[in-house]
Amino acid sequence: MKQRTLFNTTYKQNAISLLGITMLAFAIPVSAYTGQEFAGEAGLTLAQARVIALKAHPGKITDAELEQEKGGSGLRYSFDIREGKTTQEVGVDAKTGEVLENVPAGKNPD
């Protein structure tokens, strides 16, 4: 009986640790973005939009914002995604999840 209790306790501790690490990995980059005042109008969360953007262009997200912009529903998440020495700007419609933009960022990505 003690082995089963020890196993369950260890399993639970590992599961909780893994969950905490996963949440932290998403919480740190997600917490800092501009346009949070529009979040109530969005159909997608920032985390969901990040997944879509990274599928469109893998790399490391260096900047994220939620903005009102022409095209699509008029509300989009914009991500600067760095891969190697290049930065790509990926725009995801905040209501539908459609990729609206996937182009190299200009000289001064914002």
Image (cartoon, grey):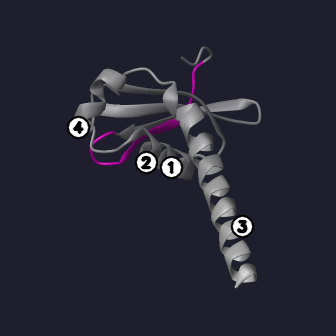
Q: Is residue 104 left or right of residue 82?
A: left
Quadrant holding the N terminus? bottom right
Looking at the rendered image, the disc whose residue lies closer to the viewer, 1 or 3, is: 3
Q: Amino acid at mark 4?
A: Ser
Marks 2 and 3: CB-CB under 8 Å? no
Identify the residue shown where x is 59% and y is 54%: 19
Q: Earlier in the sequence, mark 4 or mark 1?
A: 1
Image disc number at residue 51: 1
Callout 2–callout 4 Cβ contact below 8 Å: no
Q: Is residue 11 above or below residue 83?
A: below
Contact (CB < 8 A) between labels 1 and 2? Answer: yes
Q: Earlier in the sequence, mark 1 or mark 3?
A: 3
Q: Amino acid at mark 2?
A: Gln
Q: Quadrant of residue 29?
A: top right
Residue at the disc numbered 2: 48
Where residue 89 sits: x, y (%)? 53, 32
Furthest-top residue in this view: 108
Q: Could you tell me how many numbered marks the image carries?
A: 4
Task: Let me know if residue 95 is in the magenta part.
Answer: yes
Residue 73 is labelled as 4
Circle 1 SS class = helix
Q: Position of residue 18 (x, y in %)?
A: 66, 56
Q: Which residue is mark 3?
A: 10
Q: Report, in whole angstroms, how far the alpha carbon at label 3 lies from the one at label 4.
A: 48 Å
Which dot, 3 or 4, sits closer to the camera? Answer: 3
Distance from the alpha carbon under mark 1 to that under mark 2: 5 Å
Indicate which disc, 3 or 4, sits on the residue closer to the N terminus.
3
Query: Which amino acid type is marked by label 1?
Result: Val
Mark 4 → mark 1, Cα distance in angstroms: 19 Å
